Image: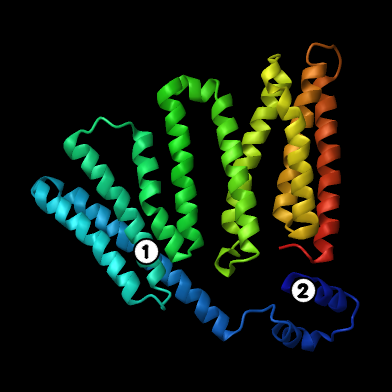
Amino acid sequence: MKSSRTKVLLQQWIAQGHVPPDKVQSALEIADITPNQNQWRLFLDKLLLANGGGLFLFGVVFFFAFNWQEITRFHKFAMIESLVLASLWAYSHWFSRPSAKVFVMAAAVFVGVLLAFFGQTYQTGADTWQLFATWAMLITPLALLAQLGALWLLWLILVNLSIVLYFQVFHGLFGVIFSSNQLQLAMFFFNTTALLLWEFFATRLAWLHGRNEVRLLAVASGFSVTWLMLEAIFSHDQEFYWIVVAYPLWLLIGYTLYRQRIPDLFMLAGGALTLIVISTAFLGKEFLNKQGNFFLLLAVWVVMWSSLAIHWLLKIAKEGKHE
C-alpha cells in the first residue's frame, strides 16, 4: 500500500476516534509516515552531499573568475581538462558510493566550462545555441552510463536552451518574444516526447522514479500547448487550427496517464489550470466587443471553474492514490 493511501486511511481513523490520542505518534511511526532516525540521517546525507557538490562547483567558477588574468592560456586549458578527468576518475573510483553522483555531475558541468573557454579563446564564431547543443551531445554518453535522473534533467535543459537560442539567432530576439509560435511548437513536441519517454522508462528503470524531473517536463509541455492554444484563439491564421485537435488529445492522454495509470495530483492540477486559462481566454475574445459586465462575467467564470477544480482535486486527494 502506498504511503499516501496509508496516510489518508490513518487520518480517517484518527478523525473517527479509532486511534487513541496517546497512540497517534506510535501509529505514525508504525505506518512509516513519520521519518525515523535512519530516514532523517539519509535525508541529511543527501542534503549535505548536494550542498557540498554545489559549493565545490561554485568554488571552481569563482577561482577562475578571480585569477583569470593571472593564469596563462595553457594553464587554463590544463586545469579545466584536469578537472574533467579528475571528476571522471573519482566517479569510477567511488562508483558504489552516493558521492559518485556529485563527481559525474561535476564532470558534465566542467565539459561546458571547457567548451565555453575554447570558444572564447579561439573565437570560433559559433552561435551560442551550438555551444549548448555540443555540450548536450558530449555529455550524452555520461548520462547513458551514469543512470542519474539529475544528469538527464541537465541534458534536457541544455537541449531546451539550444532550441530557444536557435530561434533567437534565426528569427531575432523580438521574433522569439512576440512571434514564437514555431519555437513553442518545437518546445511542445520535444518536451512532450521527453515526458512520455521518461514515464515509459520509469516503469522499467528504478533510477528514473523521481517525480520532480517529470513535473518540470510537464510544466514546459503545458506552457507551450497553452501558448499555442491562446494563439489559436486570438489569431485568425489557419495554421493554428491543428492545435485545437492536439490540445484535447493532450488533455485526454494526460488524464488517462495521471488519473488511472500513474496517479499524480500535480499533473492533474496543471491540466485543470490550462483548461481554466484557455476557456477564460476564449470567453474573453467572444465578449470583448460586447457591452455589459464583461469583466464580472469573466471573474464569475474563473471563480466557478476554479472552485470545481479544487473540489475535484480534493476528492482525488482523499483517495490517497496519487504521488
Q: Residue 94's quadrant in the figure?
A: bottom left
Residue 54, visible in the rendered structure = no
Task: Look at the numbered discs 1 and 2 and tell me whether their residues touch, using CB distance below 8 Å.
Answer: no
Q: Nearer the viewer, residue 33 or 255?
A: 255
Q: Which residue is mark 2?
A: 7
Question: What residue is shown at x 60% (from left), y 31% (from top)?
Answer: 185
Q: Residue at x 25, y 30 (%)?
A: 125
Q: In what quadrant of the picture does the C terminus appear?
A: bottom right
- Residue linked to disc 1: 104
Neighbourhood count class around disc 2 (C-alpha, 10 Å): few under 14, some 14–19, many 20 upward: some
Q: Quadrant of the N terminus?
A: bottom right
**Mark pair 1, 2: CA separation:** 37 Å
Mark 2 belongs to which amino acid? Lys
Question: Which is nearer the N-term, disc 1 or disc 2?
Answer: 2
Query: Eyeballing the image, is 201 above or below 128?
Result: below
Q: Residue at x 75, y 53 (%)?
A: 257
Q: Nearer the viewer, mark 1 or mark 2?
A: 1
Q: Is residue 263 above or below residue 166?
A: below
Q: Is residue 163 left or right of residue 69?
A: right
Indicate the amino acid at tag 1.
Val
